[in-house]
Image (tube, rainbow, N blue to C red):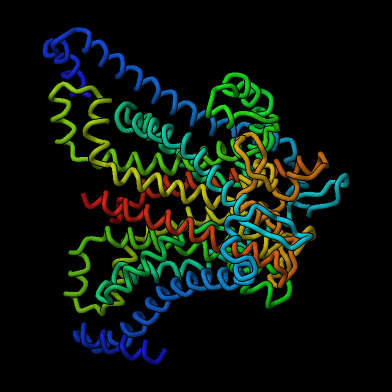
Amino acid sequence: MMVVSSTTAGQEAAASGRNAGGNAGDAAFGVLARLAGWSILLVMAGIIIVLVSGGWQAFSTFGPGFITSKAWNPITHNFGAATSIFGTLVTTAVALVFAVPFAFGVAFWLVEMAPPALARVIEMAVQLLAAVPSIIFGMWGFFIVVPFMAHYVEPVATRYLGHVPGIGLLFRGAPYGTGLLTGGLILAIMVTPFICSVMADVFVSIPAVLKESAFGLGETRWEVMRKVVLPWSRQAVMGGIMLGTGRALGETMAVTFVIGNSNRLGWSLFAPGNTIASLIALEFPESSAGSLKLSALLALGAILMVISFITLACSRMFLQRGIKN
Amino acid sequence: MSAQKVQAGATDGWQRGGAQAVRRRIVERLVSVLCCIATVVVLFLLFSILWTLVTRGAAGLSLSTFLHSTAAPGSGGGLANAIVGSCEQTLLAALLGTPIGMLTGVYLSEFSHDGKIVSFVRFVSDMMLSVPSILVGLFVYLMVVEPAGHFSGMAGTLALAILFIPIVVRTTEDMLHLVPRAMREAAYALGAPGWRVIVSICLRAARGGIMTGILLALARISGETAPLLFTSLGNLNWSTNLNAPMASLPVIIYQYAGSAYDDWVQMAWTGALLITVAVLATNIFARWWLSRNGTASS
């Protein structure tokens, strides 16, 4: 702390030097601002250290096999991360499969087709959808979407897609309603507004002259979008999608309600499963301090941290590059 | 819009064969229809959620919802302890987070002469913006709850503050960047010291935008459940003591929605309606306020 304040005061005095009375104030303000800024680093470092050191017991007990083991058995103290990592990745993938086309459609409509007055209202509605708390999505999903899936979507999907070679495997199994597919769909609804607003921002920011010259050549709106706007904004669009991915990976409450919470790994999207976040939310209250189970949960938390870090870092990189272009 | 009319006219004369022109027009129509469908579906989902909340939640709304604490199934009760607990934790988190968040935003925007570390802080703050909230709950559990030996409202407040700060950092920095350079230079030319320029000129000019950011952040953390599960835990009795487990609306919703008692499920819907109305109203108000005041000041 001594080092901090002395260098700060020195810098400020050297930098300003215009007003003797302001120096003390400047020094104090500089210290405050720097302390606040560096406290962010401290919190982030704290989160990483706490998760990794808490999960160390699990990592050292099970070794690298922790990540590939499908076990989750509190009685025999045998824990593995494979099923929950699998569930996290599958639900996120399902979410993206549905969210990206919808987000693109809405963004395209908002930017190119909607009357401006209507576009403003719809944009507001999309942002409100993003503001709805995740627990509401979970509850709505549990009481409305799950029965709908069990009665209509899943039986129909099994009937028509269950026999298709290859992907048919994904659509077999008892229609419980809860499961990886429902979890992914709820996540899709939650991340669509995020991806959509990034896309709309990017599509608006393209220089008008690029679009106008393409229109001038007689291109249709779709051709301008596909051949001019999308290539120009590719990076930023990827950044937006990654941002949505990051949200989907760590979402807890909405998924916990509809995923079915069972520790299994298989091809069927209808089968109940779990994600890292839902497993932590459910099992953490039942694990005693210092137990191997707690350590395994913290290790899962550390893994989730790493996955979402990589995603978010990619997102930031893409967005910055996209904006610089 | 005029560009499209020109384009529609140009297509007929310019194209070689009629078949390709027809195909292009069909694809264009098809994409337009699909985009409209996508928009309608997204809007329909939003209205489905709101409709479900209103139809199922309104039945449980009465004066006793706001006046009584949660009670055993079958014996009535309300949500008063949860509402007060939610307000207390959210507002305290905002009180704790606002100065730190604003100072960090100022640091990122005005102290760029500090070099690489500033962009590193910006990077970390952006990461924290999207860190899974349940991990923040785990962190606070291990740092505060486990050493103290009991769950507490203070721990919940801390977890919410950690989620609150990065949002305020982001808006503060963005809004400070919008303050015109000439305004700062004018203040410096009058002999104001650096900190006075930042506090009285820059922050003042950007206050509309920053206030909006704070309101949006408030709305965001008031609906958070995951970080509260392991920190303030929830409390079925009336308690405003920060050193004891504290109830909150999202946690009550989580506990009640999965229960087997009809009146608890009803109470969960009512709580869900209350929190959604509060969050969405704050959002609408903040955006309306920004559109009125934000542009005038910057």
Is A167 positioned to the left or the right of A135 in the image? left
Residue drawn 61% across the image and 74% down it: B143
In this rendering, the answer to whether A115 lies above or below B20 is: below
Q: Quadrant of residue A210?
A: top left
Percent across and percent down for residue A1 are 42, 89
In this rendering, the answer to whether A103 lies above or below B284 is: above
Residue drawn 37% across the image and 62% down it: B172
Is B72 positioned to the left or the right of A214 in the image? right
Percent across and percent down for residue B48 are 58, 30
Query: In this orientation, does residue B157 appear?
Result: no
Percent across and percent down for residue B115 are 27, 74
Viewer-nearest residue: B241 or B192: B241
Residue drawn 52% across the image and 50% down it: A249
Q: Quadrant of residue A224?
A: top left
Residue drawn 26% across the image and 31% down it: A225
Please, which residue is most extreme toward the right here?
B75
Viewer-nearest residue: A86 or A231: A86
